[in-house]
Image (cartoon, rainbow, N blue to C red):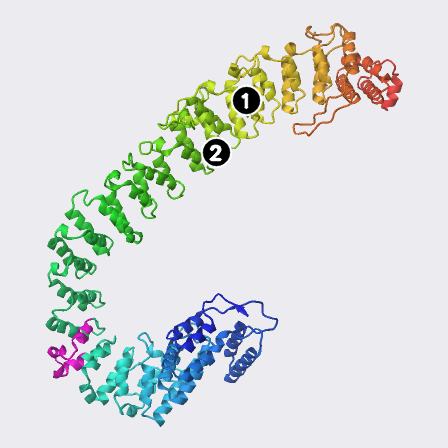
Amino acid sequence: MASSPNPIDIENVKQLAASGSPALAEVLEAYLEQPEPTPDAPPREGALTFQAFLQLLATAQGLRTPEQRRERATDAWKRFLAQVDPAPPPRLELADLLVRIYDEGTDAGRSALCDVARSAPLVFGAWGGLKRIYKLAEARLDAELFGALAFRFDTEVARGGRREVSRGTLIYMRRRAWRFLRELGRSVPELYPQFAVEVLRHYPPDTRFGDLWVANHVWAHGTGKYDGRSFHGGVPPSDMVKHRAFGEAWKRSPDPLMLLLSTCQADPPARFAIQGLRKDFPEALRSVTPAWLARLAYRPLASAHDFLVETLLGSPELHQSKLRGLGLHDAALALLDSPSAKARAFAIEYARAHAADLDAERLAALLGSAHKDTRAFAASALQGRGPRALGHAFLGRLLRHGETEAWAAKALSESFDRAELPEGFLVDMIYGEPAQKRWAAAYFKAKYRPGEPGTGFWVRVLDDPRHEDDDQATSTALDALGKHPIAAIGTPWLLTALTRKRLGDTVATWLRKADALPDLTAEGVERLKGLVFSAETRAVALEVLGNPKIVTPRQLTLPWLLALARRADPALNGFARRYLLAHMKPQDFDPGQDPSGRGDREAGTAKLFALALGEKEPEPMRAFAQTYLRCHHPVLGPEQGEAKELELKPALKRAAFTAERIWPALFDKREDVRRFAALVTRAELRAWGYQTRVYELAHSDAREVRNIAFDALRKAGDPSADPAMTLTLEELDPAQVFALTESLKKSARELGLSLILKHYARIGGPERLGWLMQSADREVRLFAVRMLWEKHRPRDLPPGWHPRAARGEAAAPAEPPEDAGRFADVEALRRFLRYVLSGIPAGRSPEPGDDAGPRRRLSASEAKRHVIEIVRDLAMEDAAFAALVAPVIAEFTGSVAKGEWQACLAALMRLRRAHPGLEIEGLASGSVGQESA
């Protein structure tokens, strides 16, 4: 099976044939024009598809000898028809169907077959049926079908288009058609003219007669100027009866020639008939009936018209004065648009003398003739009639023709008052042909004052459906309408026109320039609101809605603006934000406004904070509310870009920005909420009295929140710092600062260490350094030991102590350290170290980084090992510090804790290696050297 989207299948054609439908030929041709159906499955291997079969036939036609071509084509047909899969295309069934219709012999069937023979595509299926019908027509002496098919064979050779029949086959068939006519003329001459006429009457006017075979044999066989394929020389000849075939057969009766002249479609067959009648049957021409002559007038053939005129002029019984009585009046007038100049001249002369009452509509139709003399006659006849008798509508139509344009324009302007030309007529002229448009433009300029006609007329012009296809008329109407005040046009129409393709841009320009729309109703405002959701009208709708001279804030309504602000579309929420910022006061946000629109400021402020910080509010809404609160903050507002752009003055007091509203937002999971809260907190921190709570912020995961604490603490005591958001030195809390060193955030730990270093004299001390030495962070422990040594060095230093110089430089002379906080002597510092090492508790946790997971607790021995390692590292750099701490470390080598004494022993050996001259009680220098080796 094959599947196809084609709307017609073979069963449809069969049903029409069975019912005798007059549409059979048309449907059959449409069926043959369809593409071939697509198979449901790929063809099996080795199968001969229809396209492959056609290719085999085309290859066969390229062989050299007829025998080879015939043999190869026959083999292809046998192979294709013998296979079952894939089955032959259904259209091959048409051959039997057409022959069956022919055999039935019904009038409807024969008419359909003639139509198919004349124009159906010559493809397999239809071709098989037509070829068999042709052979039957020859055998049965069926002149009608023979003529239709012989005509088709004769013209198809030189015609393009879709066909599957080879050129050679068509040449053979047309040669066969002439051979049949020739044999008929020899054996049955009385039938020859009948069959020849049936062929000749089918040729259309656009036929290339020089390429024909059958027709040229009919009227030029005797010239002998032809070979096996075509004629040579001038064909058709001027004398078409001198060399005609079987001339005696044509002299038997005038009836075939009379039939040909009455039914042929082209001039050469008509001339052949006329010349034959004049030569062989002159008495028959003198006895023709007026009805037969009248039929010739309606044939679109110049030769037939010339023959008709000659016949009329040659007979006194057919004088012009008698034509009306003979029923030839209309036939003579029909020659007014004849392709023959001779016939047109006769008709014009007759019309002037005998048709003064010729209908104006017919004359107007003749103005569209292709012939200049006919148009001139029609124009002259019309201009001889009164303009008012013709009427303004008819004169408007005459504007379209060059011969009558000037006269009609003058008649309309001078013969009719302005009130006599109705509005509909003027609209028709505006939408008419170019000449009618020109007249309309000149008429309005001459007959109307500025501002006339009014807006109603031009609105009706633009409401005419024709404006969609007429740019010039639309432009004219828009230009005229644009000269009126926009208030006079009418807002309802403007809003409707805004959505129309050809009017929208111009109307949008008018609306943008408008300062007022007095007739804008509540319904109109709602329509404008609806237009913001269309991409084509959004921009102008927002501009009009945003103009408070046209639409007041109360007409827009707060709920609609807030709904717009919630939308993700930046154009919509951007408009809502700007409008709310510029035109809405805090009290306007009060959900409980009274009917007059007055609201409570406090309630409106609370609503704004709910919109800015609410958990369920979408981001665009939060962004608007946050912007509004920022712009109306007394301190922050003047610095905001939106406030500067819109020239806003703060409408809120600082008391509205309470800590209860803002402080919790610093810990919100939404970034925009935190940023807003951070900005307000910086401005209100000291006003709230929350400056001492900045330590809480230093541990935040959000950088913008941590930075509040960092800025407040780093600049503590700096005279150039902003006092509103900076702590004083007195407000630094030692416990909180030292607690920063244990923060989960590395940046907070670094802040704590920098504060300790900067303000050690105020917040430090050896006890706190001892606490730092137990930190899980190695950097903190190292910092504590360094600070201990630098800030609390004993007053009586070990003998020979001096600061360690850089490599390659001489040691600088020792400078006495600050006395404040220093230990009284070396032993005091050693006692402190013993206290720290022996009193380290368990529980401090390691801190690998800012994003670390849950931390495990350290054991006391591990914490003590960390302190020993830090003391060791500093002692390796400083010999004096090494001499001070070595005895303390040596004391702990006797600990029962394996990890502790091993760490101390390892530290002492590394100190001995770093300072070879260092004496450590209980360790012999030799043993240390061996160990190091």
Mark 2 crowd level (few <14, some 14–19, many ≥20, 10 Å Cα)? many
Q: CA distance from mark 2 to mark 1?
A: 22 Å
Residue 625 seen in the current view = yes
Q: Is residue 272 left or right of residue 15?
A: left
Query: Vertically, is 641 above or below 396?
Result: above
What amino acid is labelled 1 in the image? Answer: Trp
- Which image quadrant is residue 367 in? bottom left
Query: In this orientation, which residue lies closer to the viewer: 889 or 96?
Result: 96
Query: In this orientation, which residue lies closer to the viewer: 349 or 551?
Result: 551
Q: Going from the N terminus, do you reach mark 2 or mark 1 first? A: 2
Q: Secondary structure at mark 2?
A: helix
The residue beneath circle 1 is 663
What amino acid is labelled 2 in the image? Answer: Pro
Residue 226, numbered label: none
Residue 248 falls inside the magenta stretch = no
What secondary structure is the stretch in magenta mostly built from? helix
Residue 663 percent location from the top left of the image: 54, 22
- Which image quadrant is residue 559 in? top left
Q: Secondary structure at mark 1?
A: helix
Q: Provide the residue span drawn in magenta.
A: 309-336
Residue 424 percent location from the top left of the image: 21, 53
Query: In this orientation, which residue lies closer to the viewer: 23 or 475?
Result: 23
Query: In this orientation, which residue lies closer to the viewer: 367 or 225?
Result: 367
Query: Vertically, is 181 above or below 479?
Result: below
Residue 321 falls inside the magenta stretch = yes
Residue 6 percent location from the top left of the image: 47, 67
Residue 809 seen in the current view = no
Locate the N terminus and report the quarter of the image it occupies. Answer: bottom right
The residue beneath circle 2 is 620
Q: Is residue 580 left or right of residue 764?
A: left
- Which image quadrant is residue 548 in? top left
